[in-house]
Amino acid sequence: MLQRKRSERPSGTSGSLDTSLIAQGTTIHGDLRFSGTLHLDGRVEGAVLAEGGEAVFTLSEHGQVIGEIRVPQAVINGLVQGDIHAGTRLELAPQARVTGDVHYRTLEMAAGAQVNGRMAHQAEEGRRELPAPALDEAVPA
């Protein structure tokens, strides 16, 4: 039954539908790179780094990251001791506990979530501020 569902995937989306799970009780020492979706119930002592613009990282209420997180999209509901860089969207769920700076483009923060650090909104890359018009011409009175 699982093989049938896997073979029915549309072509060109194989990486975006892949989901990895790190179970509770598992500890990873070192940086973790992933693509697709990563759900962490365990502990990572190192950086969590996404490869690809569609990657999604989910940290459950049991999960812990001791290190930096750099992903396009994240849902945090556990403990993070390090900076978070969410390029597209960051959701801080009620049990999120973050000690470090949070960099985001879009933020959703539930009541009960805690951040002990700076929160910095990142402007879209294509968006720039235009200079003020020059006042070279005299204004008629």
Image: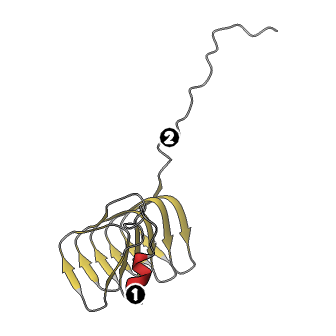
Q: Residue at x 38, y 69 (%)?
A: 36
Please identify, in this view, whether the residue under mark 1 or under mark 2 is nearer the observer: 1
Amino acid type of the residue tagged 1 in the rendering: Leu
Q: What is the C-alpha distance between the residues marked 1 and 2? A: 42 Å
**For the residue labelled by badge 1, is the local secondary structure a helix, a strand or a loop?**
helix
On residue 2, the disc is 1
Relative image position of residue 1 (x, y in whole percent): 42, 90
Q: Is residue 9 left or right of residue 29?
A: right
- Closer-to-camera residue (110/24): 24
Does residue 80 lie above or below 132 as drawn?
Answer: below
49 to the left or right of 114: left
Secondary structure of the residue carrying tag 2 is: loop
Residue at left 32%, top 61%?
Answer: 51
* Numbered tag placed on residue 18 in the rendering: none
Residue 26 point in image, percent of width and height: 24, 88
Image height of 55 relative to 139, above or below:
below
Q: Residues within 10 Å of mark 1 (few under 14, many from 20)?
A: few
Residue in view at x 37 percent, y 66 percent = 15
Q: Amino acid at mark 2?
A: Gly
Left or right of residue 136, residue 14 in this image: left
**Which quadrant would residue 18 be assigned to in this image?**
bottom left
Q: Nearer the viewer, residue 105 or 37?
A: 37
In primary-sequence order, the first of circles 1 and 2 is: 1
- Residue in view at x 31 percent, y 68 percent: 82
Q: Residue furthest left?
A: 29
**Tag shown at residue 126:** 2
Measuring from the top left, give residue 3's x and y in whole percent: 37, 84
Q: Quadrant of the C terminus?
A: top right
- CB under 8 Å between callouts 1 and 2? no
